[in-house]
Image: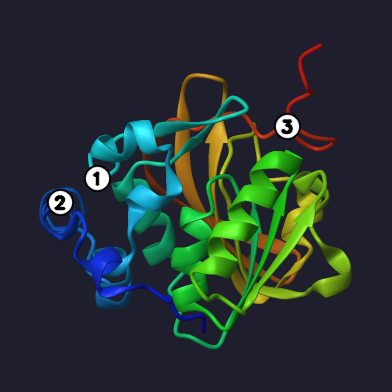
Amino acid sequence: MGAMNLTSYSLKQHAGKRQKMIEEHVIDRGIKDMRVIEVMRRLPRHLFVKDSLGHKAYGDHPLPIGEGQTISQPYIVAAMSEALQLQGEERVLEIGTGSGYQTAVLAELAAQVFTIERVKSLSQHAKVLLDGLGYTNINFKIFDGTYGWRDRGPYDCLVVTAAAPHVPRVLVEQVKDGGRIVAPVGGAENQELVVLTRHGSQVRQRRLSLCNFVPLIGKYGWPEEE
């Protein structure tokens, strides 16, 4: 697992806001996985948004990070992370690096994270930030995430941080038998967060909650607007 390399100042900065975020938007909304709770209690979310939005970093809402993308609200990050049921030895594939916040949470909970981002500037910014925080178990790739990362698989778990009408079959095939996928599915407006569990050629689906994500753009997702 990765390890944050933070100064005492970084840890103290916004500590009260982080604690309030955890109590009101994570624990009070039903998240019970203590590993997820403790990671998010320590992780400085304000570092993953623009300086001008730092004062909003611990509210329970998404925030813009540029290029038409967002950092997900804390509750959704916690719910997706908890649903993966990570124990610490897993290899996880993340589709959509974005700000790198969800990536960091995964890197604290799993052995290795493989993260793909189609927007070069976002991937590069996230890599600089996460490298600076001391993570050594994250592998970055700039590519169409709907293809997955087959040559580094199979994976124990997979998380998709953008919404499509369904989870692309090519991604399902890259998860081990018994592995879990957490993803938002639905149209441009109405989406559900679902957990898929692969059993051979069969996939079992469980609904978690309603959600609202940016579209998953790519070959097996939504087409990019002209």
Which residue ends up furthest to the top in the rendered image? Answer: 226
Residue on which disc 1 sits: 58
Residue 168 in sight in this render: yes
Q: Are marks 1 and 3 in contact (CB under 8 Å)?
A: no
User: What numbered label is drawn on residue 123?
Assistant: none
Residue at 72% across, 58% down: 172
Q: Nearer the viewer, mark 1 or mark 3?
A: 1
- When asked about the image quadrant of residue 220, the answer is top right
Closer to the N terminus: mark 1 or mark 2? 2
Q: Are marks 1 and 2 in contact (CB under 8 Å)?
A: yes
Closer to the N terminus: mark 1 or mark 3? 1
Residue at 25% across, 74% down: 8
Say if 68 sits above or below 120 in the image: above
What amino acid type is highlighted by mark number 3?
Answer: Ile
Residue at 64% across, 34% down: 164
Q: Nearer the viewer, mark 3 or mark 2?
A: 2
Q: Position of residue 89 (x, y in %)?
A: 55, 88
Residue on which disc 2 sits: 17
- When asked about the image quadrant of residue 192, the answer is top left
What amino acid type is highlighted by mark number 2?
Answer: Lys
**Judging from the image, what secondary structure is the residue with disc 3 in?**
loop
Inter-mark Cα distance, 1 to 2 = 6 Å
Q: Position of residue 68 (x, y in %)?
A: 59, 24
Residue on which disc 3 sits: 217
